[in-house]
Amino acid sequence: MSKNQETPDRDESQTSSSTQEDSDATEIPANRGDSSYSFTLSQLANPRVEVNNSEEDDGDHDDDDEDDDEEDQDDEEEEINDRFTAHWTGPYHPDAMRYAYEHNISYDRSGGQRIFNLGGHTSNFVIIGRSGGTDMAKFRVANRAFDEETRQRHRHDTELNTGTSLVGDAWHLATRGEKLRTCARHRDFYGNDKRGCEEALGVHVTALENDGRDENGVVGVKERIQAGVELLKRPIGYDEQHLELVTELESLILPENEEVWNWQEGIKEQYEVRERQQAVADKMNAEMDQHIARWE
């Protein structure tokens, strides 16, 4: 039996100590880099400069109007607002900082700033370097590339066997495949822990029935054996709760590939189950710590 239960992967998006944006501003996903978008990302180094020619008049207003209409139409075609569209509130938005770190880019005009991750298991992003101001062209290009990479990842990783990665440090970034694989891993973990606790419990119960002697005839302290029985019963109950929650969460993930799936409600329901998972894990770990402390 492991002392501490494996907890669901929390959404941990930490920003610079000087500035932090609200992570809820992002509707759903963001994600890691994809080399297939290197052309898009190259624009970060050389963003398109829009020149204002309003003071120049060549007399050909009709052609100008047609060109403007075509540009507006192109902008409308490029503008996508779907489940995978993230509206970053600024360069300190958690997903924007993660993206800049993973792609080794800067939103700074001077290019003198860089983002580093000081964390280990979790993310702790900090910004190093003097600011020259935010280059909004770079920032918008990165935001759009971020959205498109998210769409591609979700198109390609939909099943248990379409990838190997698990949910990262943020649930809203995860593909359907990552969520299913994470559920499978949690089911294995809690199932194995439950079986191990049940086997150990059987040994303790037998020792009590044998008047405090274990299976080898060694006399133990009956009080400590009884405490061991109580200690083992608790995680078994918590493991059962976790297994039920994993099944419930999985049932909310499976419909994601259906056309009629309401992603706004569906993701919200998934988060609610994950909050209950975390509450069970926290309660379990706190109780285990208390019981162990009594007998140390």
Image: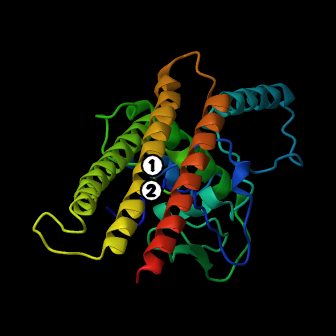
Q: Is residue 51 above or below residue 65?
A: below
Q: Is residue 274 above or below residue 156?
A: below
**Which amino acid type is marked by label 2?**
Arg
Residue position marked by numbered label 1 in the rendering:
237
Q: Nearer the viewer, residue 292 or 248?
A: 292
Other residues around mark 2 within 10 Å, as few (<14) / some (14–19) / many (≥20):
some
Can residue 243 be seen? yes
Q: Distance between the residues labelled 1 and 2?
A: 5 Å
- Is 68 left or right of 235, judged from the image as shown? right
Position of residue 63 measured from the top left corner of the image (x, y, whole percent): 78, 27
State the SS at label 1. Answer: helix
State the SS at label 2. Answer: helix
Q: Is residue 71 above or below residue 273?
A: above
Q: Residue furthest left?
A: 216
Other residues around mark 1 within 10 Å, as few (<14) / some (14–19) / many (≥20):
few
Tell me the residue at 46%/45% (across/down): 242
Position of residue 89 measured from the top left corner of the image (x, y, whole percent): 75, 55
Q: Nearer the viewer, residue 135 or 291?
A: 291
- Is 274 left or right of 229, judged from the image as shown? right
**Which amino acid type is marked by label 1?**
Gly
Residue position marked by numbered label 2 in the rendering:
234
Position of residue 239 measured from the top left corner of the image (x, y, whole percent): 42, 49
- Counting every numbered tag in the picture gives 2
- Is 187 left or right of 246, judged from the image as shown? left
**In terms of image quadrants, where is residue 187?**
top left
Q: Which residue lies furthest to the front in this view?
A: 211
Q: Nearer the viewer, residue 287 or 97?
A: 287
Marks 1 & 2, CB-CB < 8 Å contact = yes
Tell me the residue at 47%/71% (across/down): 291
In the picture, the quarter occupied by the N terminus is: bottom left
